[in-house]
Image (cartoon, grey):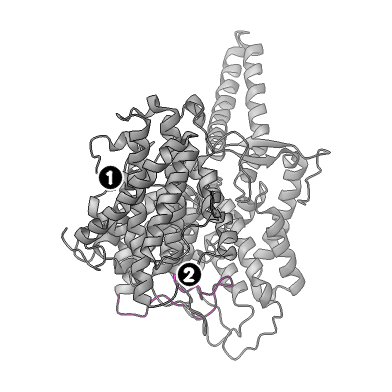
């Protein structure tokens, strides 16, 4: 329990939109000062004439009230930025906070803790006793989201001392060099220190206090400079690691200010290109910088990617931003990191680490979907912006032209499949033969990604070659198409597709078969290349799928209905349904069969005939659930089978089973 949960005798929750509240705070902070100054001036000027004294006094009361309420507003904002907050029921984009923690007493307690934490943090880390280090860690853990704790501690430290604090603490468990032994006994606890310090720094960056404005500017400027490593006389000090290396290891947790991340990323990429392309050694530090995960922390892009995955808006801006490459031509940060950059081997001894590129995948998820990885799509995030859609188009094109970009790092496939699951309408529009009315059959809520027919096929084929990629695409596409069938059947006037119910359902069924055929062939192709038996989906798979599948069921409904939502994300015309749930449960547990009881699907990806039958059966059940009638099941199954067979020629003509496709 948080230390002041019972401050007002109980727990009461309120809904907060962090972005909107931040705007209100900025406005109140700016306007109350102006109001106070001008009202005081005119009160003095008009006093001689005996005019306006009472009215101006009322204005001064309002200004004073606004000034006194600012700390409470700021406290709500910091609480709302806690990444563990749950969504506020019924209101998209809002989170729950505990109003019992919004008290002046809590603010005062946080200020006292900030003073103590600052005194400890300003010490040389080597001079901290184990008890003091534990106290400092506890203060960070309890107060990182408490206004005014974070901004006071981090602002008082300044950028350079923040870097030296973590570098010093991080290396307490290592012999510091110059022949000095280390008697530090708590190195196993440094992962918690790193996490709680990271959360504190992240919270502080969301403050616009003068000290934090200066801190953010200084931190970007310090990125390329070494952080001096002190040594005893007569040795002096060494250069130490660059600021970017130290700071990026404090970006693995927390929600950083978007503008700071954008400025930091611009400077980091510039420095990264100089470091990796220069004559000297690549990124690296003499000491230890990271205590979480299995990477050493010697690649600053790793921590930065983790920060971007928690800040979708900043991620979109970063990956779409451009810089000049070695040839002097504009190159997006996406192209640089995904196609050009040689990611350093940052593995710990005896442990292979892919944390860097894996974090890139998570950051790309955030950038293209508008929400953090693992979160469910909302009606707002389903409305992709032009920047997001263009970024997805770039991803599809890159993988299509050179599948080895993905195949050499196939652990990215789950992230790419997660992204694709929120661009099913765009992908289907690229694959379908119905080019005239594709936007009505597979409507999008925002900007539609521009995808070429063969690019889409090659991209999906490449992602599906990986087991996790295939499973996600297989299940989530069936859930999406079932939802779409239901909405098209129940609300044809909203979609305006120029077919009757049966024509619409069977067209979706055909396109489902085509999609499933492309990814089925991809998984089949890789399984046979590996010459390994592929185990049937068992209870363990079902248990695993049930954990991530629920999010896809919710997202599928959102994606299908988002084009027909009103203000605030309210669904028009009752566009809700159950087909998605029934199909999802059927894929996991089997569909009812008159002769066999339960007919299981997708049990062996090495048998394409079985995969085709599974596609037809799942699509039939989707049509039946969507329409509430069995009469649509048979034609839907037949058309799904046709689509599945058509995937063979699509894969052949697109040369999806070749690696490179330059110039197409």
Mark drawn on residue 324? none
Q: Nearer the viewer, mark 2 or mark 1?
A: 1
Q: Residue furthest right?
A: 9
What element does badge 2 sit on? helix
283 within the magenta span: yes
**Dots 2 and 1: beta carbons under 8 Å?**
no
Extent of the magenta region: 278-300
Q: Which residue is mark 2?
A: 355
Q: Which residue is mark 1?
A: 432
Number of marks in the rendered image: 2
Q: Residue furthest left?
A: 663
Give whichever of 383, 331 is nearer the camera.
383
Q: CA distance from mark 2 to mark 1?
A: 37 Å
The part of the image, by quadrant, that contains residue 481 is top left
Q: Position of residue 528 (x, y in %)?
A: 35, 73
Q: Position of residue 444 (x, y in %)?
A: 36, 38
Name the side, left or right, on which 643 lies relative to 38.
Answer: left
């Amino acid at each position: 329990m948080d230390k002041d949960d019972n401050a007002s005798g109980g727990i009461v929750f309120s809904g907060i939109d962090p972005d909107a509240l931040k705007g209100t705070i900025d406005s109140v902070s700016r306007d109350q000062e102006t109001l106070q100054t001008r009202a005081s001036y005119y009160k003095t000027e008009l006093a001689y004439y005996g005019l306006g004294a009472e009215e101006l006094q009322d204005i001064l009361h309002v200004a004073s009230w606004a000034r006194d309420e600012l700390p409470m507003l700021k406290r709500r904002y910091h609480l709302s930025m806690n990444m563990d907050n749950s969504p506020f029921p019924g209101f998209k984009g809002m989170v729950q906070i505990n109003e019992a923690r919004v008290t002046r007493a809590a603010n005062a307690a946080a200020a006292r803790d900030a003073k103590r934490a600052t005194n400890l943090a300003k010490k040389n880390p080597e001079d901290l006793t184990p008890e003091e280090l534990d106290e400092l860690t506890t203060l960070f853990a309890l107060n990182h989201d408490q206004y005014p704790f974070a901004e006071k501690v981090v602002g008082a430290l300044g950028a350079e001392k923040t870097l030296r604090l973590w570098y010093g603490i991080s290396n307490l468990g290592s012999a510091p060099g110059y022949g000095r032994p280390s008697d530090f006994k708590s190195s196993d606890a440094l992962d918690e220190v790193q996490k709680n310090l990271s959360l504190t720094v992240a919270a502080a960056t969301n403050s616009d206090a003068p000290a934090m404005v200066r801190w953010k500017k200084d931190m970007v400027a310090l990125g390329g400079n070494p952080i001096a490593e002190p040594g005893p006389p007569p040795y002096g000090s060494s250069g130490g690691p660059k600021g970017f290396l130290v700071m990026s290891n404090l970006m693995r947790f927390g929600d950083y200010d978007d503008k700071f991340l954008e400025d930091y990323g611009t400077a980091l990429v510039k420095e990264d290109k100089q470091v990796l392309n220069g004559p000297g050694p690549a990124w690296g530090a003499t000491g230890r910088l990271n205590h979480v995960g299995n990477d050493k922390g010697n690649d600053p892009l790793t921590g930065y990617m983790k920060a971007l995955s928690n800040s979708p808006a900043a991620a979109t801006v970063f990956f779409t931003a451009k810089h000049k490459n070695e040839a002097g031509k504009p190159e997006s940060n996406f192209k640089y990191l995904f196609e050009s950059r040689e990611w350093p081997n940052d593995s710990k001894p005896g442990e292979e680490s892919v944390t860097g590129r894996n974090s890139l995948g998570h950051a790309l998820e955030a950038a293209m979907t508008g929400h953090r990885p693992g979160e469910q799509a909302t009606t707002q995030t389903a409305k992709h912006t032009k920047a997001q859609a263009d970024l997805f188009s770039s991803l599809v094109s890159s993988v299509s032209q050179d599948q080895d970009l993905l195949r050499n790092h196939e652990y990215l496939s789950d992230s790419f499949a997660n992204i694709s699951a929120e661009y099913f309408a765009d992908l289907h529009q690229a694959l379908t033969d119905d080019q005239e009315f594709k936007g009505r059959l597979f409507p999008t809520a925002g900007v539609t990604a521009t995808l070429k027919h063969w690019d889409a096929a090659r991209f999906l084929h490449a992602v599906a070659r990986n087991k996790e990629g295939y499973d996600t695409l297989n299940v989530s596409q069936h859930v999406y198409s079932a939802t779409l069938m239901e909405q098209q059947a129940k609300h044809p006037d909203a979609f305006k597709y120029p077919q009757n119910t049966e024509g619409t359902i069977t067209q979706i069924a055909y396109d489902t078969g085509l999609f499933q055929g492309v990814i089925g062939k991809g998984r089949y192709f890789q399984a046979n290349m590996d010459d390994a038996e592929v185990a049937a989906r068992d209870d363990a798979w079902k248990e695993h799928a049930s954990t991530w599948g629920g999010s896809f069921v919710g997202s599928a409904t959102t994606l299908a209905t988002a084009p027909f939502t009103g203000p605030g994300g309210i669904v028009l015309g009752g566009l809700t349904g159950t087909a998605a749930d029934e199909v999802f449960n059927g894929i996991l547990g089997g569909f009812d069969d008159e002769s066999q009881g339960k007919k299981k699907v997708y049990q062996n990806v090495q048998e394409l005939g079985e995969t085709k039958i599974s596609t037809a059966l799942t699509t039939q059940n989707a049509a039946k659930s969507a329409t509430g009638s069995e009469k649509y099941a048979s034609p839907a199954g037949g058309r799904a089978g046709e689509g599945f067979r058509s995937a063979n020629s699509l894969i052949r003509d697109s040369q999806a089973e070749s690696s490179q496709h330059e110039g197409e």
